[in-house]
Image: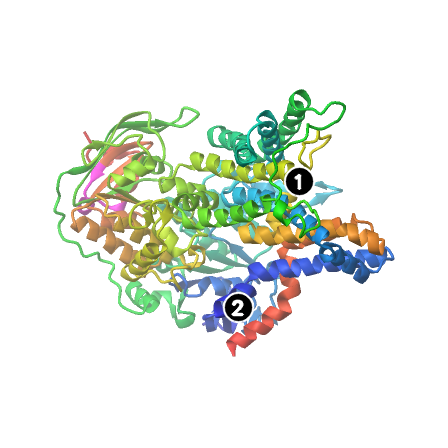
Amino acid sequence: MNKWRKIFLSDNIIVPLVAILLGLLVGAAVMLIGGYNPIDAYRFLIKRVVGTPYDFGETIRQITPLIFTGLSVAFAFRSGLFNIGADGQVLIGMTASTAVALSWSGLPSWLLVPLSVIAGGLAGGLWASIAGYLKAKRGINEVITTIMLNWTALYFSNYVIRHFYLLKGQNRSEDIGASATMTFLGSTFSNARVHWGTVIALLAAVFFFVYLWKTKQGYEMRAVGLNSKAAEYAGMNVGTNVVKAMFISGVFAGLAGTFEVIGVFHYQSVFAASPGYGFDGIAVALLGMNHPFGVVLSAILYGVLTYGSAGMSFGAGVPPELIKIVIGSIIFFIAAQGIVRFVLKPFYLKRKKEKVM
Amino acid sequence: MSASTPVVELKQITKRFPGIVANDSISLTLHKGEIHALLGENGAGKSTLMNILFGLYQPDEGSIEIGGKPVKIDNPNKAIKLGIGMVHQHFKLVQPFTVTENIILGMEPKKGVNIDYKSASAQVAKLSEQYGLRVNPDDKIQDISVGMQQRVEIMKTLFRGADILIFDEPTAVLTPQEIEELMAIMRRLVAEGKSIILITHKLKEIMEISDRVTIIRRGKVIDTVDTDKTNPNELAEKMVGRSVSFEIDKTEPNIGPAILQLNDVKMTSKDGVALLNGLNLEVKAGEIVGIAGVDGNGQTELIEAITGLRKIDSGSIKAGGKEIANLSARKIAESGVGHIPEDRHKHGLVLDFSVSENLVLKTYYQAPYSKGSFLNRNAIDEHAQELVGKYDVRTPGIETKVRSMSGGNQQKAIIAREIEMNPELLIAAQPTRGLDVGAIESVHRQLIEQRDMGKAVLLVSFELQEIMNVSDRIAVIFEGRIVGEVLPQNTNDQELGLMMAGCWDQGGQPVE
């Protein structure tokens, strides 16, 4: 009991919670200025998310890729790397899955689906490893290479889809037969697009936790992330760890792409611009304090706000873009923890006094 | 005591942190033109007290008077306005900026909207001359020595009009010569009417330069004494709370076969400068060899070469008869080389790891700390618990992050880790840097214990006293070569100093 109490009162939990609250308040203030009723807006937002089984299922669908990309960014961060390239890795994962699923469409689906998933994860991982390798061998900052690789991934994916898998007369691939949809849940959620990716995403979070904190390799990775000099002194191979960390980070991102095609859309679009999953991932990771379970929670928040914003506009007439302000301010408050601590100060003082007594 | 009002008077200052009283009703007076030393072990509360005076912390109780007037100092800017300047132990300088740019940072003299560099530079030059600092205003920080950088820190406080200067462990990073020069500068400063609070735990310096000493132990003032009415033994006793021996008890070494042999080792930097220039060195089982030298003559590179952190170009390095040159750091560690690194924050520890995680930094992958791919937490924690007790590492718990521990205890943790690996050769680089008398004594004892157990110990230090006291043999390094070897009982500071400056023919025997 006491342990739980301690966990919930620790700064790592309180600061994000207060930041969320402050973010919602800022959003409310903006709504008031704009002449909208914030209470109504938030009410419709929640209603949209939990109102019907279909919407609830769709919210889960919205959350899933955010968990993956959030984990991707957080994992790299824990190893001392800033992976801005989750976006590109998502696209490469998506493309690899599409390619496998369409090229061997004759295979039975119990074989094709796992193959496609493995291809997506592997491709995302290898793509990210390019940046890892350049960092380890040539000392090139991964921020720069991953950003560049995002564009490479975008155009490369579009090329592959256009030249090999294009549905005639459309700007997208042919339909993918392989499907990771959870058909048995279809009726529960009124045919919302729920898929196995969600389960895999949660498992990925558990893997993240176990790998980083319970295994030898994870210990090395954290040591490299926190102090690469000390890791080197202790005889760890910093370069290998960098490549490995980028690979795992890329696998997470690649899986986000995989399940978007075989779980949700069942085709891949030719993208005019980057779909932005990876960038949302940065926000999710930040919000989740780069902890796997934090990432899951923050992905839920992010997904709920994003999906619910449609309800907000439908029910209360608030433009859905306003939710970006809310999300933006939450992230701002998380990053500027000083402000949150300032808000909390009176409470802390009280606690301290109690302690002294 | 003079009759004039003190420039600073701290009255009954109390500061509590969760679980600890850092300052317990501390009173201290500083007179004009006085050098007042603040002596205490690591974690005794010296820094807390000075941070209160500099406005970084607020006292829970007590008051501060500056020039007889009560003041409330709630931020460093206010402290600066009141004429208080702090020379931090870790310099706060912008490396690619010039001396002048660093000094005026934050209060740049303006000419219209432009910074008036010309007058700033002139002002800096004038200050430099007035206090005998001999700093070139146009040099970049990255190009000047550590001693010079410190002078820039001093000038920063003077430029801001400080009359009360706080020096936080100023000699920790300096060479013996630079220390002498700093002493001269401090004398000049007080002659010009400044007052100085000197935080240190080096008794020699206190005896040499201070007028009065206030000794703090566990947050309480133990005593304030006039320096000329005391002696180092008395001070040490007051500081540690028990008598301390400066004479290191050690028996004659029982020297065995050579453990470490370096033969004609060469290493060049990226731009082709010779860092190690045909270095020869031998350390035998059962002896402590001290490397004396001025900073930057290849000490760091020598250690990096032996421990595998940096590749050598040619030559041979043998440990226990086996060639280890250019092997990986891990292979070398496994072949029986322990290494207490020079910079414990940069290399020795992962500061955001817990004590237990740091104690297995080099052995985490071996049994029993790992089983298969997984770490064995229980074994790691047990190991930590054992070492914390055995080596007297004072920490609230083994889950505590080492970042929050004092320097002395961090060092104890590193030494515990290295010695527990039971190496045949133990390399100790600056092992007592920044430690207090009690901790230094314990580090020295441990090194000697290792030697008595028949291990080879290589000690690198800028503290001549340490080299003289602990080593069985002294090798002097100059420009990447060992230029001479002497026995500590047959030499003195002057001779070593000359050898360290490259005039080795005055003293010891050439190596070969």
Q: What type is the residue that disc 1 sits on?
A: Val
As drawn, B482 above or below B425: above
Label 2, on which residue? A5
Q: Chain of mark 2?
A: A
Residue A64 horizontal/vertical position (percent): 62, 46
Left or right: A149 with respect to B240? right
Regarding residue A207, the answer to whether it shows in the image is: yes
Label 1, on which residue? A264
Q: Residues within 10 Å of mark 1 (few under 14, many from 20)?
A: many
As drawn, A108 above or below A333: above
Q: How is the image coloured?
A: rainbow
Is residue B487 in the magenta section? yes
Residues behind callouts 2 and 1 on a single chain = yes
Q: Residues within 10 Å of mark 2 (few under 14, many from 20)?
A: few
Residue B440 horizontal/vertical position (percent): 30, 56
* CA gap, disc 2 and disc 1: 39 Å
Q: Chain of mark 1?
A: A
Residue B103 horizontal/vertical position (percent): 58, 46
Is residue A81 in the magenta section? no
Marks 2 and 1 in Cβ contact (< 8 Å): no
Instruction: Name the residue located 57 percent from the left edge and 63 percent from the top edge.
Output: B55
Q: Earlier in the sequence, mark 2 or mark 1?
A: 2
Q: Which residues are magenta?
A: B485-493
Regarding residue B107, the answer to whether it shows in the image is: no
Residue B464 horizontal/vertical position (percent): 29, 47
As drawn, B471 above or below A159: below
Within the image, what quadrant is residue B277 found in? Answer: top left
Viewer-nearest of discs 2 and 1: 1
Outermost right residue: A35
Instruction: Name the residue located 62 percent from the left edge and 62 percent from the top edge.
Output: A341
